[in-house]
Amino acid sequence: KGLLTSISQIRSSLIDNTKSSQNSQINSTKEEVNLGRSMAQSFYQLKKVIKDWELAYTLKSSVSGVVTFLQVWNENQTINVGDNVFSIIPDAKNTFIGKVKAPALNSGKIKVGQRVNIRLANYPDREFGVLRGEIKNISLVPDKDGNLLLDVALPNGLKTSYDKQIVFQQEMKGSAEIVTEDLRLIERILYQFKNIFEQV
C-alpha cells in the first residue's frame, strides 16, 4: 500500500512538472512574440525618423556622379525651397537625360513613365523628326518660378523619330510635348537638354 502511494505521488509530481514546463514554454513563446513585435515597431519608427531627417536636411540625387554647383555658395548659407543648388554629372556615358520645366499649375496629369516628344529648336521636327523620351522623375516642389523639374530619359539616345542622329551640344533647347493618357498636353515649356549620363 505504501508503494502504491509513492508511485501515485511520483506520477502526480511528474504531471505537475510537465504542466509547469508547458506553461513555461507558452510564456517563453509569448515573450518571444512580444519581443519580436516590439523590435519590428522600433525598427519601423527608426526608419521613419531617418527618412524624415533626410527629407528635411539632405539633398539627394537619383543618379550618382560628380556635383557641379550652379553658383557660389557660402558656408551656412540659407537655401530656399525651389532654389537650383547644383547639377549632377553621372559616371556612366552615352545615356542622355533631358531636363524639362513644366508649370506646376494643372500638372496633376503628369506622371512618371509617360511618353514625351521633344522638338529641338535648332532641328525643325518636319525635317528631323522628334526625340522620344520617358519621364523618370518629377520634383516634389516647384522652383521659385512655379515650375516643376522633370527628368526625361531618352531610350534611343539622340536618334529621332525619322531615324536621324542628332549631334550633341551642351544646353540644347526646345519644347516638350507630354503624352498623358493618350492625350497630348502641349505646353510651351523650356526644355534644357544636357549631357547627363545615367549610371548603368
Image (cartoon, rainbow, N blue to C red):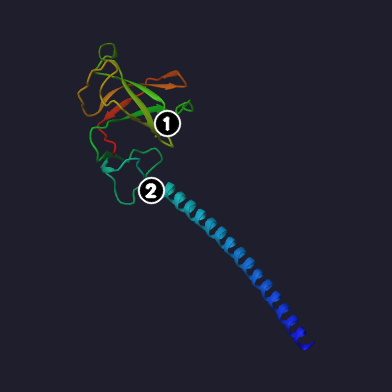
The kind of secondary structure element at disc 1 is loop
Tell whether 155 sits left or right of 49.
Answer: left
Q: Quadrant of the N terminus?
A: bottom right
Q: Which residue is mark 2?
A: 58
Residue 181 numbered tag: none
Residue at the (28%, 28%) spot, across then down: 193
Report, in whole angstroms, how far the alpha carbon at label 1 lies from the one at label 2.
23 Å
Residue hosting label 1: 112
Q: Nearer the viewer, residue 87 or 47?
A: 47
Q: 40 or 117, which is in the foreground?
A: 40
Q: Of the residues shown, which amino acid type is indicated by label 2?
A: Thr
x and y percent of residue 77 in the render?
A: 34, 48
Question: Left or right: 200 with respect to 8?
Answer: left
Query: Residue 38: in sight, yes or no?
Result: yes
Residue at the (45%, 19%) spot, across then down: 182
Secondary structure under the numbered disc 2 in the rendered image: loop
Dividing the picture into quarters, in which one does residue 87 lie? top left
